[in-house]
Image (tube, grey):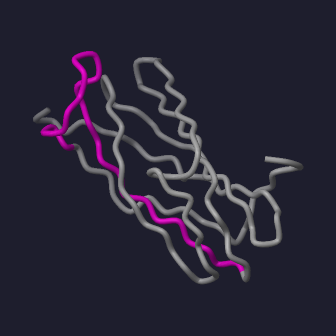
């Protein structure tokens, strides 16, 4: 990424759902898997290519995990004006946690932009 990265009003992220999924694989030290469903909407007049992401998972007990990488779910989706890219993925945690972050993109005009991922909670159900 070159130059300044600015928050882009035309790009917005929505957390569509968060589901505790005890049947998914998880390590003994982080036994609670959650699937989250995300939509990235492009309300701008230019296409935006999602080039990267950064997630920050803050567990209530104090551990902080930062996940950064290229693209999103192995892709670099181009979101056309008025378009949406939706996907799901998952995090594993040792207990309840707050999650937030950002997606980083490049507009068709070469500007580097980001859109914040609204903070959401990974809450264990009473039966877990």
In the image, is residue 1 above or below residue 77? above
Residue shown at 36% from the left, 55% from the top: 88
Residue shown at 19% from the left, 43% from the top: 21
Locate residue 115, reporting x and y percent.
Answer: 65, 57
Residue shown at 55% from the left, 79% from the top: 83
In the image, is residue 122 above or below residue 15? above
Residue shown at 69% from the left, 72% from the top: 10
| 98 with respect to 42 (left or right) | left
Locate residue 26, reporting x and y percent.
Answer: 23, 28
Magenta stretch encompasses residue 55: no
| 112 with respect to 120 (left or right) | right
Magenta stretch encompasses residue 38: yes
Q: Quadrant of the C terminus?
A: top left
In the image, is residue 125 above or below residue 40? above
Locate residue 27, reporting x and y percent.
Answer: 25, 22
| 26 with respect to 57 (left or right) | left
Query: How many numbered circles are shown?
Result: 0
In the image, is residue 17 above or below residue 123? below
Q: Magenta stretch?
A: 21-44
Q: Closest to the observer: 87 or 94?
A: 87
Locate residue 49, reporting x and y percent.
Answer: 64, 64
| 37 with respect to 84 (left or right) | left
């Amino acid at each position: 990424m070159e130059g300044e990265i600015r928050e882009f009003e035309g790009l917005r992220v929505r957390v569509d759902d968060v589901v505790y999924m005890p049947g998914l694989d998880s390590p003994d030290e982080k036994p609670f898997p959650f699937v989250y469903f995300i939509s990235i909407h492009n309300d701008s007049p230019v296409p935006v290519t999602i080039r990267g992401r950064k997630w920050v998972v803050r567990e209530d007990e104090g551990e902080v995990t930062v996940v950064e990488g290229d693209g999103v779910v192995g892709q670099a989706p181009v979101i056309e004006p008025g378009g949406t890219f939706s996907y799901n993925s998952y995090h594993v945690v040792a207990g309840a946690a707050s999650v937030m972050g950002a997606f980083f993109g490049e507009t068709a005009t070469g500007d580097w932009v980001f859109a914040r991922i609204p903070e959401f909670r990974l809450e264990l159900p009473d039966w877990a």
